[in-house]
Structures are given as structure tokens and as C-alpha cells.
Image (cartoon, rainbow, N blue to C red):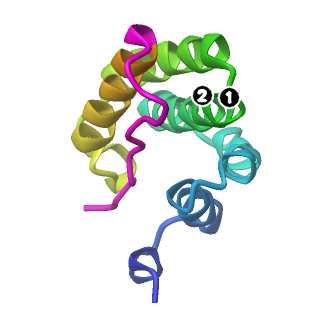
Amino acid sequence: MSNYSQHSHNPLLIKGLEEFNKREFYDAHETLEDYWRMLHDDEKELVQSIIQAAVGYYHFGRGNRVGARKLLVRAVARAESVAENTLGIKTAPYLDCIRRSLQAVENDVCETIEMPTICFL
């Protein structure tokens, strides 16, 4: 049983985060984009950050470090702009991890980068 099934969150959010955490970044992007359209304010910003991170990690996995950096920069900026625990998501660990990912991509220090697992409170 997924830890998400215990929560009463929107099914698209749950599905998108499960796909993200399984590193199915293209699918997560598609699913979360449908959900993102329903949102406003911090919730919209956080989901956009997760979408951008997913696309960034997708680019990284395909060897496109320029694209990865571009999307991770945007994902960090959006995640920095939202209140902690928006949508009941542990935003601080997510933000810390995407910052480390961005730093690794910018410094070209590794063949793989750490990717966050997004969790609810």
C-alpha cells in the first residue's frame, strides 16, 4: 500500500507524485500538468515546481544537462516561493534535494544526481 493512499488528496496529485517517486518523470509531468490547471497561488507554484523538476530530471536522464539545469533553476525558484507544507507536502526536504541536484548539474560533478522522494506530512 502506498503512503499516499492514506490521504484524502486529489487523485491526480497522488498519481503524479507516485510517478515522480518511481522516476517516471515524463508521466509525472503529464499527470501533474492536468492537476496544476485546477490550482491557484502557492499550490499552483509548488505543483509547477514539481513539474519543472520532473522535466529537469527527465532531461538529465537523457544526457541534456543544459535542459536539466534550466528546469531545475526554475523548480528551485518556485519551491522557494511557497509556504512550508503547501498541499500537505513536506516541501523543505524536496527543496533541499532539488538544490543539491542543481548544484551537481552546475558543477558537472557526477554522472548521477540525487533525486527527491516527495512525501506528504
Q: Nearer the viewer, residue 75 or 23?
A: 23
Assess disc 1: are there few (<14), some (14-19) or many (≥20) residues with their C-alpha within 10 Å of its C-alpha: many
Q: Nearer the viewer, residue 108 or 48?
A: 108
- Residue 18 in the image: state x and y as whole percent: 55, 65
Q: Secondary structure at mark 1?
A: helix
- Residue 118 in the image: state x and y as whole percent: 39, 53
Amino acid type of the residue tagged 2 in the rendering: Gly
CB atoms at circles 2 and 1 under 8 Å apart? yes
Q: Is residue 89 left or right of residue 61?
A: left
- Residue 121 in the image: state x and y as whole percent: 25, 61
Q: Residue at x 66, y 32 (%)?
A: 55
The quadrant holding residue 13 is bottom right
Q: Residue at x 61, y 17 (%)?
A: 65
Q: Residue at x 47, y 81 (%)?
A: 5
Prevailing secondary structure class for the magenta stretch in the rendered image: loop
Q: Secondary structure at mark 2?
A: helix
Is 44 situated above or below 72? below
- Residue 56: image tag: 2
| First to last magenta residue range | 106-121
What is the C-alpha distance between the residues marked 2 and 1? 5 Å
- Residue 59: image tag: 1
Is 49 situated above or below 68? below
- Residue 39: image tag: none
**Residue 114 falls inside the magenta stretch:** yes
Q: Is residue 94 left or right of residue 46?
A: left
Q: Residue at x 34, y 43 (%)?
A: 86
Amino acid type of the residue tagged 1 in the rendering: His
Q: Nearer the viewer, residue 117 or 64?
A: 64
